[in-house]
Amino acid sequence: MNDISSTNREGFLVEKSQRVLLDFLKEGIVPATGCTEPIAVAYAVARARKESQGKELERIEVQVDSNLYKNGLMVTIPGTSEKGLLPAAAFGFLAGKTEKGFRVIEGLTEKDIRDAQLLLAQNKIQVTLNQEYIGLHIEVILFTDLEKIRVITKDRHLNIINVEKIPKDEHFKPFIIKDTKKKDSDKKIQEYSLEDFLNFSNDISLKELSFLEEGITMNMTIAREGLTIEHGVSTSLTELIKDELISDNMATRAQVLCAAASEARMAGSRFPVMSVAGSGNHGITVFLTNYAVAEKESLPRESLLRSLALTSLITFFIKSYTGTLSAMCGCGVAAGIGASAGVVYLLGGNKEQIMGALFNMVGSISGVICDGAKEGCAYKLALASGWAVQSALLSWKGAIIHNTDGIAAPGFKQLFQNLGYLCDPGMIATDKAILDIMLKK
Protein backbone atom coordinates (compact mmCIF):
# COMPACT_ATOMS: atom_id res chain seq x y z
CA MET A 1 0.00 0.00 0.00
CA ASN A 2 2.84 2.38 0.83
CA ASP A 3 4.51 1.50 -2.47
CA ILE A 4 1.31 2.35 -4.38
CA SER A 5 0.96 5.61 -2.48
CA SER A 6 4.60 6.47 -3.24
CA THR A 7 4.13 5.67 -6.91
CA ASN A 8 1.00 7.82 -7.11
CA ARG A 9 2.81 10.68 -5.39
CA GLU A 10 5.72 10.46 -7.81
CA GLY A 11 3.31 10.42 -10.76
CA PHE A 12 1.52 13.47 -9.40
CA LEU A 13 4.79 15.39 -9.03
CA VAL A 14 5.86 14.50 -12.58
CA GLU A 15 2.50 15.62 -13.95
CA LYS A 16 2.64 18.87 -11.94
CA SER A 17 6.16 19.56 -13.18
CA GLN A 18 5.03 18.98 -16.77
CA ARG A 19 2.14 21.42 -16.35
CA VAL A 20 4.44 24.10 -14.90
CA LEU A 21 6.99 23.76 -17.70
CA LEU A 22 4.26 23.71 -20.33
CA ASP A 23 2.91 26.93 -18.84
CA PHE A 24 6.40 28.46 -19.14
CA LEU A 25 6.38 27.59 -22.82
CA LYS A 26 2.89 28.92 -23.50
CA GLU A 27 3.49 32.15 -21.60
CA GLY A 28 6.95 32.79 -23.06
CA ILE A 29 6.30 31.87 -26.70
CA VAL A 30 3.87 34.36 -28.24
CA PRO A 31 3.44 36.18 -31.58
CA ALA A 32 4.96 39.66 -31.88
CA THR A 33 4.84 42.22 -34.66
CA GLY A 34 7.86 44.50 -34.68
CA CYS A 35 10.80 44.89 -32.31
CA THR A 36 9.51 44.35 -28.78
CA GLU A 37 11.17 47.42 -27.23
CA PRO A 38 9.28 50.06 -29.30
CA ILE A 39 6.24 47.79 -29.02
CA ALA A 40 6.51 47.93 -25.21
CA VAL A 41 6.39 51.73 -25.36
CA ALA A 42 3.45 51.64 -27.79
CA TYR A 43 1.66 49.21 -25.45
CA ALA A 44 2.17 51.41 -22.37
CA VAL A 45 0.96 54.52 -24.22
CA ALA A 46 -2.04 52.62 -25.59
CA ARG A 47 -2.88 51.52 -22.04
CA ALA A 48 -2.79 55.14 -20.88
CA ARG A 49 -4.94 56.20 -23.81
CA LYS A 50 -7.46 53.50 -22.90
CA GLU A 51 -7.90 55.08 -19.45
CA SER A 52 -8.35 58.59 -20.82
CA GLN A 53 -11.64 60.43 -21.03
CA GLY A 54 -10.10 63.68 -22.23
CA LYS A 55 -11.01 65.12 -25.61
CA GLU A 56 -7.73 66.89 -26.31
CA LEU A 57 -4.19 65.59 -25.98
CA GLU A 58 -1.80 68.09 -24.42
CA ARG A 59 1.35 65.95 -24.36
CA ILE A 60 2.84 62.54 -23.66
CA GLU A 61 5.98 62.11 -21.57
CA VAL A 62 7.82 58.79 -21.77
CA GLN A 63 10.86 57.80 -19.72
CA VAL A 64 12.71 54.54 -20.34
CA ASP A 65 15.76 52.67 -19.04
CA SER A 66 19.04 52.68 -20.96
CA ASN A 67 18.68 49.21 -22.51
CA LEU A 68 15.19 49.84 -23.81
CA TYR A 69 16.31 53.23 -25.11
CA LYS A 70 19.28 51.58 -26.84
CA ASN A 71 17.17 48.85 -28.43
CA GLY A 72 14.48 51.22 -29.62
CA LEU A 73 16.73 53.86 -31.13
CA MET A 74 17.19 52.64 -34.72
CA VAL A 75 14.59 49.96 -35.38
CA THR A 76 11.80 50.42 -37.94
CA ILE A 77 8.13 50.32 -36.91
CA PRO A 78 6.25 47.56 -38.81
CA GLY A 79 4.60 48.68 -42.04
CA THR A 80 6.22 52.14 -41.96
CA SER A 81 9.53 53.87 -42.63
CA GLU A 82 9.48 55.44 -39.16
CA LYS A 83 12.24 54.49 -36.72
CA GLY A 84 12.47 54.67 -32.94
CA LEU A 85 10.49 55.18 -29.76
CA LEU A 86 8.85 58.51 -30.67
CA PRO A 87 6.77 57.10 -33.54
CA ALA A 88 6.10 53.98 -31.45
CA ALA A 89 4.52 56.19 -28.79
CA ALA A 90 2.52 58.08 -31.44
CA PHE A 91 1.20 54.89 -33.00
CA GLY A 92 0.37 53.47 -29.57
CA PHE A 93 -1.71 56.56 -28.81
CA LEU A 94 -3.47 56.72 -32.18
CA ALA A 95 -3.97 53.06 -33.09
CA GLY A 96 -2.86 50.86 -30.19
CA LYS A 97 -5.02 47.92 -29.14
CA THR A 98 -3.76 46.53 -25.84
CA GLU A 99 -5.80 43.35 -26.16
CA LYS A 100 -3.43 42.33 -28.98
CA GLY A 101 -0.37 42.23 -26.70
CA PHE A 102 2.89 42.28 -28.67
CA ARG A 103 0.80 42.94 -31.80
CA VAL A 104 -0.56 46.18 -30.29
CA ILE A 105 0.09 48.33 -33.39
CA GLU A 106 -0.23 45.65 -36.04
CA GLY A 107 -2.01 46.64 -39.25
CA LEU A 108 -1.22 50.36 -39.32
CA THR A 109 -2.98 52.17 -42.17
CA GLU A 110 -1.73 55.02 -44.34
CA LYS A 111 -4.03 57.30 -42.34
CA ASP A 112 -2.47 56.10 -39.08
CA ILE A 113 0.98 56.93 -40.49
CA ARG A 114 -0.08 60.41 -41.64
CA ASP A 115 -1.77 61.13 -38.31
CA ALA A 116 1.33 59.99 -36.40
CA GLN A 117 3.58 62.19 -38.51
CA LEU A 118 1.31 65.16 -37.82
CA LEU A 119 1.29 64.41 -34.08
CA LEU A 120 5.08 64.15 -34.04
CA ALA A 121 5.39 67.45 -35.91
CA GLN A 122 3.42 69.11 -33.11
CA ASN A 123 6.13 68.07 -30.61
CA LYS A 124 3.55 66.72 -28.19
CA ILE A 125 5.53 63.56 -27.46
CA GLN A 126 8.76 63.46 -25.49
CA VAL A 127 10.88 60.35 -24.93
CA THR A 128 13.77 60.62 -22.49
CA LEU A 129 16.40 58.30 -21.09
CA ASN A 130 16.42 57.81 -17.32
CA GLN A 131 19.74 56.22 -16.40
CA GLU A 132 18.61 55.72 -12.81
CA TYR A 133 16.14 53.04 -13.87
CA ILE A 134 17.35 49.52 -13.15
CA GLY A 135 16.20 46.77 -15.48
CA LEU A 136 13.45 47.16 -18.06
CA HIS A 137 11.42 50.20 -17.00
CA ILE A 138 8.93 52.45 -18.82
CA GLU A 139 7.00 55.36 -17.33
CA VAL A 140 4.33 57.04 -19.45
CA ILE A 141 2.43 60.15 -18.37
CA LEU A 142 -0.44 61.18 -20.63
CA PHE A 143 -1.70 64.75 -20.23
CA THR A 144 -5.15 65.72 -21.56
CA ASP A 145 -7.52 68.64 -21.07
CA LEU A 146 -9.17 66.69 -18.19
CA GLU A 147 -6.58 64.46 -16.50
CA LYS A 148 -3.13 63.01 -16.10
CA ILE A 149 -2.61 59.27 -16.47
CA ARG A 150 0.54 57.45 -15.40
CA VAL A 151 1.42 53.94 -16.56
CA ILE A 152 4.51 52.08 -15.33
CA THR A 153 5.97 48.93 -16.93
CA LYS A 154 8.66 46.92 -15.13
CA ASP A 155 10.97 43.94 -15.77
CA ARG A 156 9.09 42.52 -18.76
CA HIS A 157 7.85 44.29 -21.89
CA LEU A 158 4.12 44.09 -21.22
CA ASN A 159 4.24 43.86 -17.43
CA ILE A 160 2.32 46.98 -16.41
CA ILE A 161 2.57 47.24 -12.62
CA ASN A 162 0.81 50.55 -12.04
CA VAL A 163 -1.94 52.66 -13.64
CA GLU A 164 -3.04 55.93 -12.00
CA LYS A 165 -5.36 58.74 -13.06
CA ILE A 166 -5.62 62.15 -11.35
CA PRO A 167 -7.17 65.55 -12.24
CA LYS A 168 -4.95 67.66 -14.51
CA ASP A 169 -4.18 70.22 -11.79
CA GLU A 170 -2.84 67.64 -9.32
CA HIS A 171 0.61 66.08 -9.18
CA PHE A 172 1.63 62.43 -9.03
CA LYS A 173 3.37 61.26 -5.91
CA PRO A 174 6.71 59.50 -6.48
CA PHE A 175 6.06 55.84 -7.26
CA ILE A 176 8.12 53.45 -5.14
CA ILE A 177 8.65 50.04 -6.67
CA LYS A 178 8.53 47.24 -4.17
CA ASP A 179 9.90 43.74 -4.62
CA THR A 180 6.96 42.03 -6.24
CA LYS A 181 5.96 38.39 -6.14
CA LYS A 182 5.86 38.55 -9.92
CA LYS A 183 9.59 39.18 -9.99
CA ASP A 184 10.14 36.15 -7.77
CA SER A 185 8.05 34.06 -10.12
CA ASP A 186 10.33 35.06 -12.99
CA LYS A 187 13.10 33.11 -11.21
CA LYS A 188 10.89 30.04 -10.75
CA ILE A 189 12.45 28.27 -13.69
CA GLN A 190 15.76 28.22 -11.81
CA GLU A 191 14.30 25.48 -9.61
CA TYR A 192 14.55 23.09 -12.57
CA SER A 193 17.56 21.23 -13.97
CA LEU A 194 18.71 20.23 -17.44
CA GLU A 195 17.50 16.73 -16.65
CA ASP A 196 14.03 18.13 -15.87
CA PHE A 197 13.98 19.92 -19.22
CA LEU A 198 15.07 16.77 -21.03
CA ASN A 199 12.49 14.60 -19.28
CA PHE A 200 9.77 17.11 -20.14
CA SER A 201 10.83 17.32 -23.80
CA ASN A 202 10.95 13.54 -24.08
CA ASP A 203 7.72 12.73 -22.24
CA ILE A 204 5.23 15.55 -22.81
CA SER A 205 2.36 14.63 -25.10
CA LEU A 206 3.07 15.73 -28.66
CA LYS A 207 -0.41 17.21 -28.80
CA GLU A 208 0.58 19.65 -26.04
CA LEU A 209 3.40 20.91 -28.23
CA SER A 210 1.29 21.40 -31.35
CA PHE A 211 1.10 25.16 -30.73
CA LEU A 212 4.79 25.34 -31.70
CA GLU A 213 3.79 24.56 -35.28
CA GLU A 214 2.49 28.11 -35.61
CA GLY A 215 5.93 29.43 -34.69
CA ILE A 216 7.58 27.40 -37.44
CA THR A 217 5.09 28.64 -40.03
CA MET A 218 5.21 32.24 -38.83
CA ASN A 219 8.99 32.53 -38.68
CA MET A 220 9.48 30.80 -42.02
CA THR A 221 7.01 33.22 -43.63
CA ILE A 222 9.03 36.27 -42.61
CA ALA A 223 12.27 34.47 -43.55
CA ARG A 224 10.96 34.08 -47.09
CA GLU A 225 10.35 37.82 -47.20
CA GLY A 226 13.90 38.44 -46.01
CA LEU A 227 15.23 36.25 -48.80
CA THR A 228 14.01 38.88 -51.28
CA ILE A 229 16.04 41.76 -49.77
CA GLU A 230 18.58 42.93 -52.33
CA HIS A 231 22.16 42.73 -51.01
CA GLY A 232 20.77 41.37 -47.72
CA VAL A 233 22.71 39.01 -45.50
CA SER A 234 20.68 35.96 -46.50
CA THR A 235 20.60 36.75 -50.22
CA SER A 236 24.37 37.27 -50.20
CA LEU A 237 24.92 34.03 -48.27
CA THR A 238 22.74 32.26 -50.83
CA GLU A 239 24.86 33.69 -53.66
CA LEU A 240 28.03 32.55 -51.89
CA ILE A 241 26.59 29.03 -51.69
CA LYS A 242 25.73 29.11 -55.43
CA ASP A 243 29.25 30.33 -56.18
CA GLU A 244 30.56 27.37 -54.14
CA LEU A 245 32.51 29.75 -51.90
CA ILE A 246 30.75 28.33 -48.82
CA SER A 247 29.06 24.97 -48.32
CA ASP A 248 25.34 24.28 -48.39
CA ASN A 249 24.95 22.53 -45.06
CA MET A 250 22.82 22.66 -41.92
CA ALA A 251 24.89 25.47 -40.37
CA THR A 252 24.69 27.76 -43.41
CA ARG A 253 21.00 26.92 -43.86
CA ALA A 254 20.39 28.09 -40.28
CA GLN A 255 22.34 31.28 -41.01
CA VAL A 256 20.37 31.99 -44.17
CA LEU A 257 16.97 31.52 -42.53
CA CYS A 258 17.73 33.36 -39.28
CA ALA A 259 19.41 36.30 -41.01
CA ALA A 260 16.58 36.59 -43.53
CA ALA A 261 13.86 36.66 -40.89
CA SER A 262 15.72 39.12 -38.67
CA GLU A 263 16.60 41.51 -41.48
CA ALA A 264 13.00 41.63 -42.70
CA ARG A 265 11.72 42.16 -39.17
CA MET A 266 14.19 44.92 -38.30
CA ALA A 267 13.47 46.66 -41.61
CA GLY A 268 9.78 47.01 -40.73
CA SER A 269 8.08 43.90 -42.08
CA ARG A 270 4.37 43.68 -41.38
CA PHE A 271 4.67 39.94 -40.74
CA PRO A 272 4.63 38.79 -37.11
CA VAL A 273 7.20 36.41 -35.65
CA MET A 274 6.87 33.92 -32.86
CA SER A 275 8.85 35.45 -30.02
CA VAL A 276 10.64 33.62 -27.22
CA ALA A 277 11.33 35.20 -23.80
CA GLY A 278 10.04 38.59 -24.95
CA SER A 279 12.20 38.82 -28.08
CA GLY A 280 11.31 38.25 -31.70
CA ASN A 281 14.95 37.74 -32.67
CA HIS A 282 15.28 35.15 -29.90
CA GLY A 283 12.25 33.41 -31.38
CA ILE A 284 13.76 33.47 -34.86
CA THR A 285 17.02 31.97 -33.54
CA VAL A 286 15.21 29.26 -31.55
CA PHE A 287 12.75 28.19 -34.23
CA LEU A 288 14.75 28.53 -37.43
CA THR A 289 18.06 27.08 -36.20
CA ASN A 290 16.28 23.91 -35.17
CA TYR A 291 14.12 23.95 -38.30
CA ALA A 292 17.16 24.25 -40.58
CA VAL A 293 18.78 21.16 -39.06
CA ALA A 294 15.54 19.15 -39.18
CA GLU A 295 15.00 20.20 -42.80
CA LYS A 296 18.53 19.35 -43.92
CA GLU A 297 18.54 15.99 -42.14
CA SER A 298 14.90 15.12 -43.04
CA LEU A 299 14.11 14.57 -39.37
CA PRO A 300 10.58 13.79 -38.09
CA ARG A 301 8.29 16.64 -37.07
CA GLU A 302 8.02 15.16 -33.59
CA SER A 303 11.77 15.47 -33.07
CA LEU A 304 11.65 19.10 -34.19
CA LEU A 305 8.82 20.03 -31.82
CA ARG A 306 10.51 18.34 -28.88
CA SER A 307 13.82 20.05 -29.69
CA LEU A 308 12.01 23.41 -29.79
CA ALA A 309 10.59 22.74 -26.33
CA LEU A 310 14.05 21.96 -24.96
CA THR A 311 15.67 24.95 -26.68
CA SER A 312 13.01 27.33 -25.37
CA LEU A 313 13.20 26.09 -21.77
CA ILE A 314 16.97 26.46 -21.74
CA THR A 315 16.61 29.95 -23.22
CA PHE A 316 14.16 30.93 -20.45
CA PHE A 317 16.56 29.49 -17.89
CA ILE A 318 19.47 31.54 -19.22
CA LYS A 319 17.38 34.74 -19.43
CA SER A 320 16.41 34.35 -15.78
CA TYR A 321 20.09 34.98 -14.98
CA THR A 322 21.13 37.44 -17.70
CA GLY A 323 17.98 39.59 -17.50
CA THR A 324 15.38 40.63 -20.07
CA LEU A 325 17.83 43.11 -21.64
CA SER A 326 21.58 43.41 -21.12
CA ALA A 327 24.90 44.48 -22.63
CA MET A 328 25.23 41.11 -24.35
CA CYS A 329 23.34 39.99 -27.44
CA GLY A 330 20.64 37.63 -26.18
CA CYS A 331 20.44 35.90 -29.54
CA GLY A 332 23.98 34.68 -28.93
CA VAL A 333 24.10 34.21 -25.17
CA ALA A 334 20.58 32.89 -24.64
CA ALA A 335 18.67 31.75 -27.74
CA GLY A 336 21.83 30.67 -29.58
CA ILE A 337 23.04 28.67 -26.60
CA GLY A 338 19.60 27.08 -26.22
CA ALA A 339 19.55 26.27 -29.93
CA SER A 340 22.89 24.43 -29.68
CA ALA A 341 21.28 22.09 -27.14
CA GLY A 342 18.27 21.65 -29.42
CA VAL A 343 20.52 20.66 -32.32
CA VAL A 344 22.29 17.99 -30.25
CA TYR A 345 18.87 16.69 -29.20
CA LEU A 346 17.69 16.60 -32.82
CA LEU A 347 20.73 14.58 -33.81
CA GLY A 348 20.06 12.02 -31.09
CA GLY A 349 22.78 13.19 -28.72
CA ASN A 350 22.83 12.53 -24.98
CA LYS A 351 22.85 14.80 -21.94
CA GLU A 352 26.66 14.96 -21.81
CA GLN A 353 26.83 16.02 -25.47
CA ILE A 354 24.18 18.66 -24.83
CA MET A 355 26.25 20.02 -21.95
CA GLY A 356 29.26 19.97 -24.28
CA ALA A 357 27.45 22.19 -26.77
CA LEU A 358 26.53 24.59 -23.97
CA PHE A 359 30.20 24.75 -22.86
CA ASN A 360 31.28 25.39 -26.45
CA MET A 361 28.85 28.29 -26.83
CA VAL A 362 29.51 29.93 -23.45
CA GLY A 363 33.25 29.52 -23.92
CA SER A 364 33.29 31.14 -27.36
CA ILE A 365 30.67 33.80 -28.18
CA SER A 366 29.43 34.90 -24.76
CA GLY A 367 31.02 38.35 -25.16
CA VAL A 368 29.02 39.45 -28.21
CA ILE A 369 27.60 42.87 -27.34
CA CYS A 370 24.10 44.22 -27.87
CA ASP A 371 24.34 47.65 -29.50
CA GLY A 372 20.65 48.11 -30.11
CA ALA A 373 18.04 46.66 -32.43
CA LYS A 374 18.55 47.41 -36.11
CA GLU A 375 18.85 45.65 -39.47
CA GLY A 376 22.46 44.75 -38.64
CA CYS A 377 21.14 42.30 -36.02
CA ALA A 378 20.79 39.89 -38.95
CA TYR A 379 24.56 39.45 -38.92
CA LYS A 380 24.51 38.54 -35.23
CA LEU A 381 21.74 36.01 -35.78
CA ALA A 382 23.76 34.50 -38.62
CA LEU A 383 26.72 34.19 -36.24
CA ALA A 384 24.66 32.80 -33.35
CA SER A 385 22.69 30.27 -35.38
CA GLY A 386 25.59 29.01 -37.48
CA TRP A 387 27.87 28.63 -34.48
CA ALA A 388 25.08 26.97 -32.49
CA VAL A 389 24.95 24.23 -35.11
CA GLN A 390 28.74 23.93 -35.29
CA SER A 391 29.11 23.88 -31.50
CA ALA A 392 26.56 21.09 -31.36
CA LEU A 393 28.36 19.11 -34.08
CA LEU A 394 31.73 19.59 -32.36
CA SER A 395 30.32 18.29 -29.09
CA TRP A 396 28.69 15.40 -30.96
CA LYS A 397 32.18 14.52 -32.22
CA GLY A 398 33.74 14.85 -28.76
CA ALA A 399 35.35 18.30 -29.19
CA ILE A 400 34.30 20.22 -26.06
CA ILE A 401 35.75 23.26 -24.30
CA HIS A 402 36.97 22.23 -20.85
CA ASN A 403 34.24 22.87 -18.32
CA THR A 404 36.51 24.85 -16.01
CA ASP A 405 37.95 27.15 -18.69
CA GLY A 406 37.33 30.87 -18.21
CA ILE A 407 33.78 31.59 -17.04
CA ALA A 408 32.63 28.00 -17.59
CA ALA A 409 31.61 25.76 -14.69
CA PRO A 410 30.87 22.03 -14.60
CA GLY A 411 27.26 22.39 -13.45
CA PHE A 412 24.32 23.49 -15.62
CA LYS A 413 23.10 26.05 -13.08
CA GLN A 414 26.53 27.44 -12.15
CA LEU A 415 27.39 27.86 -15.84
CA PHE A 416 24.55 30.32 -16.31
CA GLN A 417 24.93 31.94 -12.91
CA ASN A 418 28.42 32.86 -14.12
CA LEU A 419 27.03 34.16 -17.40
CA GLY A 420 24.44 36.23 -15.54
CA TYR A 421 27.15 37.67 -13.27
CA LEU A 422 29.15 38.60 -16.35
CA CYS A 423 26.12 40.57 -17.62
CA ASP A 424 25.32 42.22 -14.31
CA PRO A 425 27.38 43.61 -12.67
CA GLY A 426 30.18 42.63 -15.05
CA MET A 427 29.13 44.53 -18.16
CA ILE A 428 27.21 47.48 -16.69
CA ALA A 429 30.04 49.87 -17.62
CA THR A 430 30.21 48.30 -21.09
CA ASP A 431 26.49 48.86 -21.53
CA LYS A 432 26.89 52.53 -20.64
CA ALA A 433 29.82 52.89 -23.06
CA ILE A 434 27.77 51.34 -25.89
CA LEU A 435 24.93 53.80 -25.30
CA ASP A 436 27.35 56.74 -25.04
CA ILE A 437 28.78 55.87 -28.46
CA MET A 438 25.31 55.53 -30.00
CA LEU A 439 24.11 58.85 -28.55
CA LYS A 440 27.10 60.74 -29.93
CA LYS A 441 26.21 59.93 -33.55
Image (tube, rainbow, N blue to C red):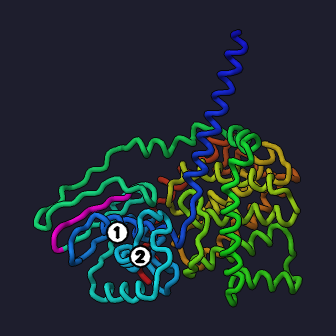
Q: Is residue 295 left or right of residue 428?
A: right
Mark 2 in CB contact with mark 1 (< 8 angstroms): yes
Helix, strand or loop at mark 2: helix
| Residue type (three-letter) at the residue carrying disc 2 | Ala
Q: Nearer the viewer, residue 213 or 264?
A: 213
Quarter holding residue 99: bottom left
Q: Is residue 441 above or below residue 429?
A: below
Question: To which residue does mark 2 refer?
Answer: 88
Q: Residues within 10 Å of mark 2 (few under 14, many from 20)?
A: many
Tell me what residue is drawn at x 24 percent, y 57 percent. 164
Q: Position of residue 51 (x, y in %)?
A: 28, 63
Label 2 and label 1: CA atoms lie apart by 9 Å
Q: How many marks?
A: 2
Q: Position of residue 57 (x, y in %)?
A: 23, 77
Q: Is residue 381 magenta?
A: no
Considering the image in quadrants, where does the C terminus appear?
bottom left
Residue 313 spot, x, y in % from top left: 64, 49
Q: Nearer the viewer, residue 5 or 291?
A: 5
Residue 393: image tag: none
* Nearest to N terminus: mark 2 or mark 1: 1
Residue 192 location (% of width, % of height):
62, 38
Side of 90 where 146 appears, left or right: left
Q: Is residue 318 above or below residue 239?
A: above
Residue at far left of view: 169
* Range shown magenta: 145-153
**Tag 1 residue:** 45
- Please indicate whether residue 280 sits to the left or right of residue 130 in the image: right
Q: Secondary structure at mark 1?
A: helix
